[in-house]
Image (cartoon, grey):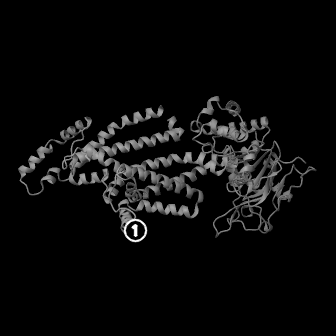
Amino acid sequence: MAIFRLAVRRLLSSAPLLFLVSALTFVLVSLVPGDPARTIVGQHVTVEQYEAVRVQLGLDDPLPVQYWDWLVGVLHGDLGASLFSGEAVTKTLNDRLPVSLSLIVAGTVVSGILGVALGLLSARRGGLLTRAVDLLSLLGLAVPAFWFALVLIAVGAVKLRWFPVTGYVPFADDPAEWARSLVLPVISLSLSAVAVIAKQTRDCVLDTFGRDFIRVMQANGFSRRSILYRHVLRNAAVPVVTVLGVVLVSLLAAAVFVETVFAMPGLGSLTQQATVQHDIPVIQGAVLYITVLVVLVNLLVDMAYNRLDPRVRAA
Amino acid sequence: MTRQPLLDIKDLTVEFGQGHRTSPLRAVDGVSLDIAPGETVGLVGESGSGKSTIGRAVLGLTPVHSGRVRFEGIDVTRAGPRTRRGLSARLQVVFQDPYSSLNPARTIGQTLAEPLLVHRRLDRRETDAHIAEMLERVGMPADTAGRYPGQFSGGQRQRIAIARALMLEPSLVICDEPVSALDLSIQAQVMNLLARLQRELSLSYLFIAHDLPVVRHLSDRVVVLYRGRVMESGPAQVVYADPVHPYTEALLDAVPAPDPRAQRARRAAQAAPKTTNPPADEGCVFAHRCPYAIDICHRERPALLPLPSRGEKQPEGGRAVACHRSGEPARVRGLHT
């Protein structure tokens, strides 16, 4: 019940955030030199023709009016149509959402499981593995996802021919091919996330192991296994969940590059194209979708806190 | 005299590795001590003297290099988790830091129920009754069990940690600096609580602290440690009133006097260390700081020997000192005039 109330309250309070983000995007996009009318008509037309297209697109209205029109549409469930393809933005986005979701959810699951497992192992074993995790996290943070993606394509797809170079196969078409098409993008997306999560997990587990209540249990002869799983993990999980939330949001950003490199028809590559073309309705719609995703992720993280840490519940 | 000691430590040595290039650090070096049922033994010394390490070795939290630890006649030097589990009903611990000694994710009731789950088959109602009784004993309100550690102050948490240690009515509780993280007024409350519980439950304490007045208040006997070795031991009142070892004397002198003028006078009188050289492998570990050190102190390690009685016929209640010059009446008298 308390969780439900928390969810409703958080969702309501995110409405102003959505408004602010969309307004800011609108201003930013209009500040970028060039405009969609110019992109559509090209360089070799008369001023009259160019102006006609501008009027037709509503670009001659003052900025607040343009934004107001868009906002009214959104409140009616209409995100407008692409300035180029003419397709409804909602349809474009809904078509592409599953691609991005597959990528991001798979990336999160992989980096969560792998990161926590590596972190736990290095906390328990120490030595060489600890140093390997340190090195990996340094590399993971230093190597940009898009460059790593190119290396993966060169090795995993071009040389070894294990995976397709680019492209995406919908799950409904062929689940096996869907999985195969996701392997390289997910690996390149998760590298830095695995590193960050592994390091955080290890540090939190070691920190918790050093606490006196764990010492009391060790002195009382509780087995290391039951201490680890029943007492340490629960306490170490809170900061790890925080990092997981941050990582998930950063995956949304990294997905823009990874989708572009692997030519995957997702939200990220769509946003990138739309930005190049000044396709304002598409940009606005994509930003709206991504913002909603971020809000949902944060809500999930908060709900996990609530479950894990009684101090959050009391506050 | 023939009564079996509750805890019997013989020649305990604990070493910590410092990588394969350097020789290991000897944190505890051949320490022997025993605790009789119902007795409190205070373990004092500056930081790094090995006092906490001795407590941790008794609890099996740190590997023992040599020597042995006997508890209630059983050798527990290298006891595994199974033996430790059995032991935990009789041997318990209270640590220094009240903020990390309780699991923040579990209610006080869950934490206190843990030892009962291991040792006794009690149903829910009996467990709750037991917890309520113990909380009352340590002076915590009845609704404590349903709350989380985060809702209590340091002193209250230390009371809860004491309650956890006493859930199974142990015979010995190792108190590792149990009050040094608390305010002075709270310290007094917790110390009084420990003293009252000892009377009510006939407990023994191994009381580890760097704060001498605290130790004096609670201990029957004290053991003074320096660099992992026993410098002096004996009945608390006698050692405090009449320290024989120069290190004990220095420790007692370091306790600030309440009167600022007396404190200033004493500071001026305190002798500076003779040399700053670290102690050699042989010789007395305190020699480099000792104002009375003579040649032999740097060459030969003094053994911990019973102190011959001075004035009375009997040795003074098992008093022992490790000092080459402890027998010299002139020096002994010279110290206290």
Residue B162: in sight, yes or no?
A: no
Q: Position of residue B88 (x, y in %)?
A: 73, 45
Name the one closer to the observer, B208 or A50: A50
At a point 42% along the width and 49% down the height, the residue shown is A246
Q: Position of residue B243 (x, y in %)?
A: 79, 52
Name the one closer to the observer, A199 or A262: A262
* Number of dots carrying numbers: 1
Disc 1, SS: loop
For disc 1, the marked residue is A160
Left/right placement of residue A232 relative to residue B50 reads: left
Left/right placement of residue B110 relative to residue A51 reads: right
Neighbourhood count class around disc 1 (C-alpha, 10 Å): few under 14, some 14–19, many 20 upward: few
Which quadrant of the figure has residue A273?
A: bottom left
Query: Chain under label 1?
Result: A
Q: Position of residue A315 (x, y in %)?
A: 49, 35
* Residue closest to the far front: A174
Left/right placement of residue B317 relative to residue A223 reads: right
Which quadrant of the figure has residue B63?
A: bottom right
Residue A152: in sight, yes or no?
A: yes
Q: Amino acid at mark 1?
A: Leu
Q: Is residue A7 above or below residue B41?
A: above
Q: Is residue B67 above or below residue B87?
A: below
Q: Is residue B135 above or below residue B48?
A: above
Left/right placement of residue A272 relative to residue B19 reads: left
Q: Position of residue A190 (x, y in %)?
A: 42, 56
At a point 44% along the width and 42% down the height, the residue shown is A300
